[in-house]
Amino acid sequence: MHIDKNDYPALGFKFKVTSTNQMKGVLGPLSGVFFDPDESFFQSVSGIGADLSTSAITDAGSNNRQYQLPGTTTYTDLVLSRGLIKSESPIAKWVSKLLTNDSFSYQVTLKTVNVFLMEKDEKNQDRIVMAWSFFNCYPKGLEIGAFNADKSEIAVERLKLTYTHFNQYFNN
């Protein structure tokens, strides 16, 4: 009996996050090429999700029937966590330009953020298993984790991004 490796669940510990300016376009076919120069490594990614709202409609003349009609899709915020970088990365510049710069006016720069779930192939090379592209992203929140003199832990920053929609890609 032959068992295909795609029959097993994907492992979620090896991934990569990249971003591109909205004007450069969207993620094309999966090729293993990452989008420079905005690539960055993160310790965790969460918030990949979508919910479809529904409206209940009752069947006229029948009290025991109800239909759920589809409505609008809403998306959860994408949360990227990583160790606090000592130098300013392109993503950190993008976030601080909108959230922390003291200015009377600001410009929201939209980006496409890509998340690649990776695994090793037969030749021990990194291979993309799945990918998600989040469109029209902009920073919604920034949180710096607690500093604690009793522990020797990495300082962590969490970036919260909002977006209009996402696409998921499979590399079979």
Image: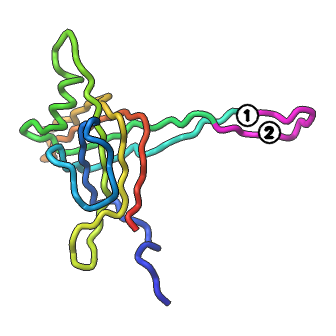
Residue 106 at x, y percent in the picture: 22, 17
Q: Amino acid at mark 2?
A: Gln
Q: Which residue is mark 1?
A: 56
- Is 164 on the left or on the right of 28, as rendered? right
Q: Give the secondary structure at mark 2.
A: strand
In the image as oriented, which residue stretches furthest toward the left? 87
Q: Amino acid at mark 1?
A: Ala
Q: Which residue is mark 2?
A: 66
21 versus 28 height, above or below: above
Instruction: Tell which of 141 and 115 is nearer to you.
Output: 115
The residues colored magenta run 56-70
Does 61 lie within the magenta span? yes
**Mark positioned earlier in the residue sequence (2 or 1):** 1
- The quadrant of the image that shows the C terminus is bottom left
- Is 77 on the left or on the right of 21, as rendered? right
The residue under the point 27% across, 24% down is 108
- The 10 Å Cα crowd at callout 2, few under 14, some 14 to 19, many 20 or more, is few
